[in-house]
Image (cartoon, rainbow, N blue to C red):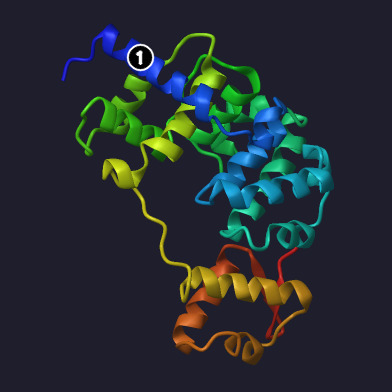
């Protein structure tokens, strides 16, 4: 399909018009603080916006700057994260804060330009932080934005990421990057949804109930209270012992927990 300048202009008008009427009021849209925007991006990964809002507000009350988060104990961070899901995201955020403070003197924006050095940050997040904090004339593409471009411009679902990103750059209205990306987010999340378009995300979130993620969360929740013996670990969840051993060993490998003298502890380093 040949995409003309008129096609792009009509698309921009459609998205921006929708946003003016239906745009969401979200707390991280009320700040240009790179730390707070980075926090929101970690929290929003594979988590519904409605669930994130209260966690976000509680978090910035407890740790209003990246320096205060870097000084926090891992146990405190995990306790604040519990219930948000994917606990490794909280740990990565804590590690990222420490690295940014130590290696980048607390400069989040400089760190985002070297995002490969920052735990849990990829190309999308690094650019999102720059866009929403400085209105930088760059683009970023998440699963919602990808779906919008595929549906609007009648692309194949197999269209490469490179081609999608190139199209995103063509469609970016200069000087309006912050509003444009917020508009795209809402247009995809509220209007051109997966259900409406029939275009699935590239990766699907696995079911939580009965999953390894659920077991890991239960183990971490218990370890926040006290160390556990192997028998106590294996009594947490009624499932195959070999499966539990694999989960525990993986958590040790990921440095989430440690084992000392046959007792399991939360790794607080």
Q: How crowded is mark 1: few (under 14 residues within 10 Å), some or many (20 or more)?
A: few
* Residue 209 position in % (x across, y down): 47, 73
Mark 1 residue element = helix
Quadrant in which the C terminus is drawn:
bottom right
Query: Which residue is located at x 79 percent, y 45 percent?
Result: 69
* Residue 199 position in % (x across, y down): 28, 43
Quadrant in which the N terminus is drawn:
top left
Res. 269 in view: no
Q: In this view, does 33 lie to the left or right of 219?
A: right
- Camera-nearest residue between 80 and 13: 13
Q: Quadrant of residue 243?
A: bottom left
Query: Which residue is located at x 59 percent, y 40 percent?
Result: 41
How many discs appear?
1
Query: Which residue is located at x 66 percent, y 54 percent?
Result: 91
Q: Quadrant of residue 162?
A: top left
Give the residue furthest to the left. 1
Q: Is residue 77 left or right of residue 239?
A: right
Q: Mark 1 points at which residue?
A: 170
- Camera-nearest residue between 37 and 90: 37
Query: Which residue is located at x 21 percent, y 30 percent?
Result: 155
Q: Quadrant of residue 10?
A: top left
Q: Is residue 225 left or right of residue 16?
A: right
* Residue 83 position in % (x across, y down): 64, 63
Asked if residue 173 is positioned above or below residue 62 in the image, the reply reads: above
Asked if residue 159 is positioned above or below residue 228 in the image, the reply reads: above
* Residue 207 position in % (x across, y down): 42, 66
- Camera-nearest residue between 98 and 87: 87
Res. 111 in view: yes
């Amino acid at each position: 399909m040949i995409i003309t300048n008129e096609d792009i202009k009509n698309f921009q008008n459609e998205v921006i018009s929708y946003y003016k009427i239906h745009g969401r009021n979200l707390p991280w849209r009320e700040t240009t603080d790179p730390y707070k925007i980075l926090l929101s991006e970690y929290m929003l990964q594979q988590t519904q916006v409605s669930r994130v809002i209260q966690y976000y507000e509680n978090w910035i009350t407890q740790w209003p700057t990246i320096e205060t988060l870097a000084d926090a104990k891992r146990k405190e961070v995990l306790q604040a994260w519990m219930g948000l899901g994917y606990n490794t995201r909280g740990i990565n955020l804590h590690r990222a804060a420490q690295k940014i403070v130590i290696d980048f003197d607390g400069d989040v924006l400089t760190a985002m330009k070297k995002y490969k050095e920052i735990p849990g940050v990829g190309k999308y997040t690094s650019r999102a932080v720059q866009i929403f904090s400085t209105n930088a004339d760059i683009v970023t593409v998440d699963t919602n934005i990808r779906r919008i471009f595929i549906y609007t411009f009648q692309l194949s679902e197999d269209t490469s990421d490179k081609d999608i990103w190139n199209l995103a750059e063509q469609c970016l209205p200069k000087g309006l990057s912050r509003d444009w990306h917020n508009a795209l987010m809402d247009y995809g999340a509220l209007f051109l949804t997966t259900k409406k378009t029939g275009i699935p995300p590239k990766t699907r979130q696995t079911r939580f109930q009965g999953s390894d993620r659920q077991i890991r969360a239960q183990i971490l929740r218990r370890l926040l209270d006290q160390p556990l013996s192997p028998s106590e670990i294996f009594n947490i969840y009624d499932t195959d012992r070999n499966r539990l051993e694999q989960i525990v060993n993986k958590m040790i490998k990921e440095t989430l927990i440690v084992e000392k003298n046959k007792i399991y502890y939360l790794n607080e380093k």
